[in-house]
Image (cartoon, rainbow, N blue to C red):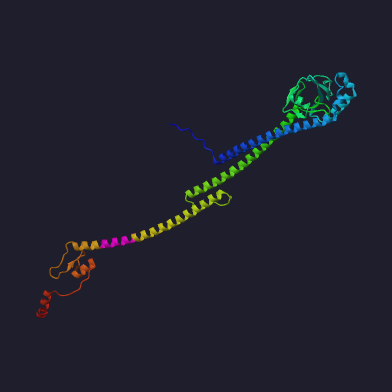
């Protein structure tokens, strides 16, 4: 059965990827959170701005002055021209405001234009009915309110704010429409800022992870190289330098191991030298004893063989043909020494009766 080859990642690669993934997750989560919060804050800020602007403008207009403005010919009236001048003074310095208008709600629920700040031919004349009435607009006849989200009508897509006119009795309101593209531009700028921050964070994290992983990889490689040196018998290698982390503990342990192995090798070399000295002495003593034994055996071989001896004087003939006294021959070949005396028979033979009396 064949085994699939295992993919092997270096420790530095694993560390780099783990940091990168962690940064992506953290940055993505934090970035998403702050982006959503920023979008919400932006929408709230725009809504608050629209609502406050509509409320402030509504206080400058009196609904009772606009009761006579109901049809297109009324654009020549002083009340219309005065109200139009006020709304245009607010709209002109604010390019993000698309439309600013005043509307009336009839008893039958119909909503129509009273004043429109538009300065083009598309300007709505007094009395023109507005068809796309949203709930927020109806609520705006009674209190300041802003759309919860963008909406679309025949003039485009907008975010609008409304406020009732002073003395309007729920029949007049001022409306401000902010262009959706302006809102989208603000959101896009926010999104781009968030993405740029995310990219910068990831880039910095990438550099940091690369620096950290390479630093750790270099330390591991150095320890591995010292371990190989130690395995090859170079017991004097030591790890120098401090990193003020767990690698210091590893270096201390490695150096202590090297010291222990070096001491053990020194003791072993001394023991081997002593054994060699003892062995040499023993070999010399064995050689000496062997030589002595060999000499003894040779002497004994001489005595063990057939010895020619004179039947009269009892001298013994050696290998060179010389005749020697028995005492001299035995002493020469065995190392034995003789003491002289007389046996009883010889004593009688030599000294006669004197020896017999003794």
Q: Dividing the picture into quarters, in which one does residue 104 lie?
A: top right
Q: What is the x, y in percent for residue 226?
A: 52, 49
Position of residue 217 in the picture relative to residue 198 (left or right): left
27 relative to 243, above or below: above
Q: What is the x, y in percent for residue 143?
A: 78, 29
Whether residue 237 is visible, yes or no, is no
80 relative to 350, above or below: above
158 relative to 227, above or below: above
- Magenta stretch encompasses residue 93: no
Query: What residue do we see at 51% from left, 51% from top?
Result: 253
Q: What is the x, y in percent for residue 120?
A: 84, 22
Q: Dividing the picture into quarters, in which one does residue 195 lie?
A: top right
Query: What residue do we see at 38% from left, 60% from top?
Result: 277
Front position in the image: 326 or 213 = 213
324 relative to 188, above or below: below
Whether residue 15 is visible, yes or no, is yes
Position of residue 270 in the picture relative to residue 241 (left or right): left
Overall secondary structure of the magenta section: helix
- Magenta stretch encompasses residue 289: yes
Position of residue 254 in the picture relative to residue 192 (left or right): left
Q: What is the x, y in percent for residue 55?
A: 80, 31
Q: Which residues are magenta?
A: 283-295
């Amino acid at each position: 059965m064949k085994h699939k080859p295992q993919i092997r990642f270096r420790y530095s690669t694993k560390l780099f990827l783990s940091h990168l993934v962690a940064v992506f997750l953290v940055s993505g989560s934090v970035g998403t959170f702050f982006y959503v919060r920023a979008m919400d804050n932006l929408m709230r800020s725009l809504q608050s701005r629209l609502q406050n602007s509509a409320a402030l403008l509504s206080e400058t207009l009196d609904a009772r002055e606009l009761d006579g403005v109901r049809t297109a010919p009324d654009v020549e009236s002083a009340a219309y021209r005065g109200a139009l001048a006020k709304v245009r003074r607010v709209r002109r310095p604010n390019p993000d405001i698309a439309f600013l208008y005043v509307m009336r709600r009839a008893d039958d629920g119909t909503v129509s234009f009273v004043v429109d700040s538009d300065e083009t031919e598309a300007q709505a004349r007094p009395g023109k009915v507005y068809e796309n009435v949203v709930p927020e607009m109806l609520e705006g006849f009674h209190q300041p309110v802003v759309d919860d989200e963008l909406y679309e009508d025949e003039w485009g897509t907008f975010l609008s704010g409304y406020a009732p006119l002073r003395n309007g009795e729920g029949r007049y309101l001022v409306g401000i429409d902010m262009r959706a593209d302006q809102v989208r531009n603000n959101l896009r700028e926010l999104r781009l800022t968030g993405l740029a921050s995310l990219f910068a964070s990831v880039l910095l994290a990438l550099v940091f992870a690369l620096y950290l992983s390479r630093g750790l990889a270099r330390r591991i490689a150095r320890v591995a190289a010292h371990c190989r040196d130690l395995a090859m018998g170079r017991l004097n290698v030591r790890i120098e330098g401090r990193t003020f982390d767990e690698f210091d503990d590893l270096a201390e342990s490695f150096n202590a191991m090297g010291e222990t192995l070096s001491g053990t090798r020194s003791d072993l070399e001394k023991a081997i030298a002593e054994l060699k000295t003892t062995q040499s002495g023993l070999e010399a003593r064995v050689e000496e004893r062997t030589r002595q034994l060999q000499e003894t055996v040779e002497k004994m071989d001489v005595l063990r063989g057939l010895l020619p001896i004179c039947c009269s004087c009892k001298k013994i003939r050696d290998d060179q043909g010389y005749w020697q006294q028995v005492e001299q021959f035995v002493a020469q070949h065995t190392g034995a020494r003789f003491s002289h005396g007389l046996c009883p028979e010889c004593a009688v033979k030599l000294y006669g009766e004197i020896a017999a009396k003794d």
